[in-house]
Amino acid sequence: MQKNKELFEVRQYFDTYLEKKWVFDTREEAEKFYELMNNKRISNLTMYQIRKVSTNKILK
């Protein structure tokens, strides 16, 4: 049996290039990390984005 699990990514872009992404189990965790990273950014070309993703987990 497969079950979709929602995950949330925080993506870091430099200009339009995707540099890094981090995955979190809850939107709240992703939002806290987003705030932390966005407040510490040193360049106006660095941007962050939160995206919802899903995975297919096989349950036994």
Image: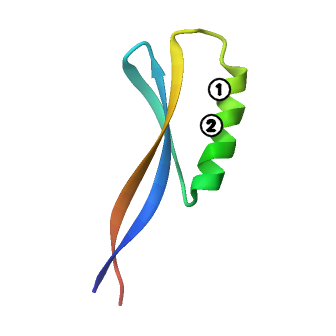
Q: Residue at x 48, y 38 (%)?
A: 21
Could you say where residue 40 lies in the image, as x and y percent from the top left?
Answer: 72, 22
Q: Label 1, on which residue?
A: 38
Which of 19 and 50 lies nearest the eye of the viewer? 50
- Quarter of the image for residue 33 reads top right
Q: Residue at x 65, y 26 (%)?
A: 38
Label 2 secondary element: helix
Could you say where residue 41 lies in the image, as x and y percent from the top left?
Answer: 66, 18
Label 1 secondary element: helix
Q: How many marks?
A: 2
Per the model, the C-alpha gap separating discs 2 and 1 is: 6 Å
Residues marked 2 and 1 touching at CB (< 8 Å): yes
Residue 49 lies, with reference to residue 58, above or below; the image says: above
Could you say where residue 52 lies in the image, as x and y percent from the top left?
Answer: 42, 51
Q: Residue at x 36, y 85 (%)?
A: 59
Residue 28 lies, with reference to residue 5, above or below; the image says: above
Could you say where residue 24 lies in the image, as x and y percent from the top left?
Answer: 55, 54
Q: Where the N terminus falls, by quadrant?
A: bottom left
Which of 18 and 30 lies nearest the eye of the viewer? 30
Q: Label 2, on which residue?
A: 34
Which of 21 and 39 lies nearest the eye of the viewer? 39
